[in-house]
Image (tube, helix red, strand yellow):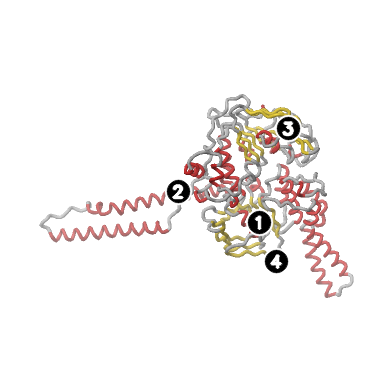
C-alpha cells in the first residue's frame, strides 16, 4: 500500500468541497480523478502534498514513499536555468549512486558481521537506483526532453523566460526524471502536442509506481488509467470505478438510467398512495349496501366494520408513504445542455474573415511569414502544430489582440467575433460571477441570473462568488458563458477543452457543432478533433494546406517520432507531430478549402 486516505473532508467557509473521502492506492494503480469544475479535484492533490489542510480525516503514506506533484499552473522558477532544474530533479539518484560508492569502499575494510549488513543495504540501494533508471540516467534525460518536445531549448536558458507551455513541460520533465514512487499529475496534457501525448501515454504505461491524475483529456484517460475516481458535485463523496474512461461512462450511463427509472417508479408509488389515502373511505363505503332505517343493529355493525376497514387501509398507506418520504430517491439532476445557447444567424458574406501577407516575429525568430487566410461562412477548421508554431498568435492577430509586423486583417460587415483564449487570465478577480457575466450588457439583473443559470454552468448560490474564489475550471466556464452572451457569429477558440470538466466539455462541444457560423479552433485534444470533424490546418507546414487529409487519417497515421522530412513537405506525408518544435515559419495557409459541408438543417454533417 502506497497511500491510505480515510474520511477526509474539506470546506471553504460554508462551501463543502470534499466530504468523507476515503480510498487506498497500491503499487501499479493508475487513477484518473474526474468531476465537475470546483468539486475539489485539484484540492485533493494539494492536500496530499501538504499545500492544503484537511478539516477532518487522515491520510498516510507508506514508509520511504516519495511523492511527486505536477500542479495545474507551473511555477515561474525564478532564478533557475533548465539545467538547474534537471540537476535538482536527479539529485536523489545522485545521492543513491553516491551511497553505493560509499558502501563499495566500506566493504573492503568491513568486518564479517558489518559486511552482511552493508551487502543487504547495497542490495536495497542498487535496486532502487536501477528501478529509477539510474544506470541509464543521461539517456533518460535526453529521452524525456525529446519526448516532451523541449530538447531544442538551451539548458542554460533561464526558466522564467520560457512560455507558459514550455514551463509546464519543463516541470513535467523534471518530475518524470525524479521518478517518484507516486505521481500526482494535475492536467498533465494541457500543453502537449500529439506526439508528446502519445509519448507520455507510453512512458506512463511502463512507469514503475502508482499514478493519480486529474485530466479532462478523454483519450488520455482511456489509455493511461485503470481506475476512475469520481467526486460528486452534490454530496462531495468519492466513488471508485474500475477500468478506463470508456468503462466509466458506460457504467455511469447505466447508473443514470436505473436512477431515473427508480425515481419515476417511486414517484408513481407516492402518487398512488396519496390517491389511495384520499379515496379509501369512499371506495370502502360503496362496497356495502347501506342498512334500512329500522335496522338499528345492522346500521351500527356496518358502521363499525367500515370504520375499521377504512382505518386499517389508510393507516397502512400512510405508514408506507412515511417510509418513502423519510428516505426518498432524489431527483436526478438535470444534465447540462448548452447546445441551443449560441443564438445567431449565419452570415451571408462569401468571405467572413481574411488576412493578407501576415508576418509576425519575436526578436529574430519569425513564427508567421507571408500568411494568407480566407474564412468562408461555413468554415470548420482545427489548427494543429507543435508548440511555438504561431497558432495562438494567428488567432490573436485575427481577433485584434496582436498587431502583425506586416500584413492586414479584414472582417466582413456585421461580423461579431467571439474569442476564447487558451488561458483564463483576463478576468477581474474582484468581480462576482454575475457582475462579470453582465458586464457591458444592459438589462434587468433577474434576467441575467435566469440566463446564466439556464446555461447549466452555474447555480444560484454561485452568482455572488468572487472570480478570485473560483477554480481555474470554473473561470473557464464563466468565460464560456460570457462568450455565449456576446452573441457571436464567428468563433475563434484557443484550446477550448482546456480546464473544463468532462460533463461541461461534452455539452460545450455539442454547442460548437450546432453553431451556424464559421469556427476556427486550436486543439491538441484528439477526442475533440475527432468529434469536431472539420478540416485540419497544420501550422508546421510551409506548403499550402489545400486538400489536407482529414483529422482522423492524420492522427491515426502518425508515424514514430522522427526529425526526417520536416519543413517544406506535403500534409499527406508528414504530420506536424513528427517535426521538432522549431520549424520554418508558416506561409501561404490557404484556409479557403478547409471547409466541412453542412446539411439542410445547418448542422455540420
Asked if marks 1 and 4 touch (Cβ < 8 Å), the reply is no
* Disc number for residue 63: 4
Tag nearer the camera, 3 or 1: 3
Q: Secondary structure at mark 4?
A: loop
* x and y percentages locating residue 11 in the rendered image: 56, 59
* x and y percentages locating residue 6 in the rendered image: 59, 63
- Which residue is nearer to you in this view: 85 or 206? 85
Asked if marks 2 and 4 touch (Cβ < 8 Å), the reply is no
Density class for disc 3 (Cα within 10 Å; few <14, some 14-19, many ≥20) is: many
Alpha carbon distance from label 2 to label 3:
50 Å
Alpha carbon distance from label 3 to label 1:
39 Å
* x and y percentages locating residue 172 in the rendered image: 73, 51
Tag nearer the camera, 2 or 4: 4
Furthest residue in direction right, as rendered: 108
Would you say residue 74 is visible in this rendering?
yes
**Left or right: 112 with respect to 265?**
right
Alpha carbon distance from label 3 to label 4:
52 Å
In the picture of the structure, the residue carrying the numbered disc 2 is 261
**Quadrant holding the C terminus:** top right
In the picture of the structure, the residue carrying the numbered disc 1 is 29
* Disc number for residue 208: none
Q: Against 59, is 534 above or below?
A: above
Q: First in sequence: mark 3 or mark 1? A: 1
Amino acid at each position: 500500500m502506497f497511500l491510505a486516505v480515510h474520511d477526509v473532508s474539506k470546506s471553504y467557509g460554508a462551501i463543502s468541497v470534499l466530504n468523507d473521502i476515503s480510498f487506498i492506492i497500491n503499487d501499479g494503480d493508475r487513477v484518473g480523478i474526474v468531476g465537475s469544475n470546483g468539486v475539489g479535484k485539484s484540492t485533493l492533490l494539494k492536500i496530499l502534498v501538504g499545500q492544503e489542510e484537511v478539516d477532518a480525516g487522515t491520510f498516510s503514506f507508506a514508509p520511504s514513499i516519495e511523492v511527486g506533484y505536477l500542479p495545474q499552473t507551473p511555477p515561474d522558477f525564478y532564478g533557475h536555468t533548465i539545467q538547474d532544474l534537471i540537476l535538482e530533479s536527479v539529485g536523489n539518484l545522485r545521492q543513491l549512486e553516491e551511497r553505493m560508492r560509499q558502501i563499495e569502499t566500506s566493504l573492503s575494510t568491513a568486518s564479517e558481521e558489518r559486511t552482511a549488513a552493508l551487502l543487504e543495504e547495497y542490495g536495497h540501494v542498487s535496486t532502487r537506483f536501477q528501478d529509477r533508471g539510474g544506470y541509464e540516467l543521461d539517456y533518460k534525460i535526453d529521452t524525456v526532453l525529446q519526448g516532451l518536445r523541449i530538447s531544442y531549448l538551451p539548458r542554460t536558458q533561464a526558466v522564467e523566460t520560457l512560455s507558459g507551455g514550455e514551463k509546464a513541460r519543463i516541470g513535467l520533465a523534471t518530475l518524470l526524471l525524479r521518478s517518484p514512487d507516486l505521481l500526482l499529475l494535475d492536467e498533465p496534457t494541457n500543453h502537449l502536442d500529439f506526439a508528446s501525448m502519445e509519448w507520455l501515454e507510453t512512458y506512463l504505461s511502463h512507469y514503475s509506481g502508482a499514478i493519480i491524475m486529474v485530466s479532462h483529456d478523454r483519450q488520455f484517460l482511456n489509455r493511461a488509467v485503470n481506475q476512475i475516481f469520481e467526486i460528486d458535485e452534490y454530496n462531495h463523496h468519492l466513488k471508485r470505478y474500475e477500468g478506463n474512461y470508456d468503462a466509466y461512462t458506460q457504467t455511469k450511463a447505466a447508473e443514470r438510467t436505473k436512477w431515473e427509472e427508480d425515481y419515476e417508479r417511486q414517484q408513481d408509488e407516492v402518487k398512488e398512495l396519496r390517491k389511495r389515502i384520499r379515496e379509501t373511505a369512499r371506495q370502502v363505503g360503496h362496497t356495502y349496501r347501506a342498512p334500512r332505517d329500522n335496522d338499528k343493529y345492522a346500521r351500527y355493525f356496518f358502521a363499525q366494520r367500515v370504520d375499521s376497514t377504512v382505518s386499517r387501509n389508510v393507516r397502512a398507506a400512510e405508514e408506507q408513504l412515511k417510509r418513502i418520504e423519510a428516505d426518498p430517491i432524489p431527483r436526478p439532476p438535470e444534465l447540462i445542455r448548452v447546445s441551443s445557447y449560441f443564438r445567431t444567424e449565419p452570415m451571408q458574406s462569401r468571405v467572413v474573415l481574411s488576412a493578407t501577407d501576415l508576418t509576425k516575429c519575436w526578436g529574430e525568430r519569425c513564427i508567421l511569414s507571408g500568411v494568407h487566410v480566407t474564412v468562408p461562412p461555413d468554415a470548420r477548421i482545427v489548427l494543429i502544430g507543435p508548440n511555438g508554431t504561431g497558432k495562438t498568435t494567428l488567432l490573436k492577430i485575427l481577433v485584434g489582440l496582436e498587431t502583425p509586423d506586416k500584413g492586414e486583417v479584414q472582417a466582413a460587415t456585421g461580423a461579431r467575433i467571439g474569442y476564447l483564449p487558451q488561458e483564463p487570465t483576463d478576468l477581474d478577480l474582484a468581480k462576482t460571477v454575475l457582475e462579470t457575466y453582465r458586464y457591458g450588457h444592459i438589462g434587468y439583473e433577474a434576467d441575467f441570473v435566469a440566463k446564466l443559470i439556464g446555461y447549466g454552468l452555474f447555480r444560484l448560490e454561485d452568482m455572488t462568488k468572487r472570480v478570485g474564489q473560483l477554480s481555474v475550471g470554473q473561470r473557464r466556464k464563466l468565460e464560456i458563458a460570457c462568450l455565449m452572451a456576446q452573441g457571436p457569429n464567428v468563433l475563434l477558440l484557443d484550446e477550448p477543452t482546456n480546464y473544463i470538466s468532462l460533463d461541461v466539455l461534452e455539452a460545450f462541444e455539442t454547442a460548437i457543432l450546432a453553431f451556424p457560423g464559421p469556427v476556427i479552433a486550436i486543439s491538441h485534444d484528439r477526442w475533440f478533433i475527432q468529434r469536431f470533424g472539420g478540416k485540419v490546418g497544420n501550422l508546421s507546414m510551409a506548403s499550402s494546406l489545400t486538400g489536407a487529409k482529414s483529422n482522423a487519417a492524420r492522427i491515426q497515421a502518425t508515424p514514430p517520432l522522427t526529425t526526417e522530412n520536416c519543413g517544406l513537405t506535403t500534409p499527406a506525408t508528414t504530420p506536424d507531430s513528427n517535426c521538432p518544435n522549431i520549424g520554418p515559419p508558416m506561409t501561404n495557409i490557404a484556409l479557403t478549402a478547409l471547409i466541412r459541408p453542412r446539411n439542410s438543417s445547418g448542422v455540420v454533417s
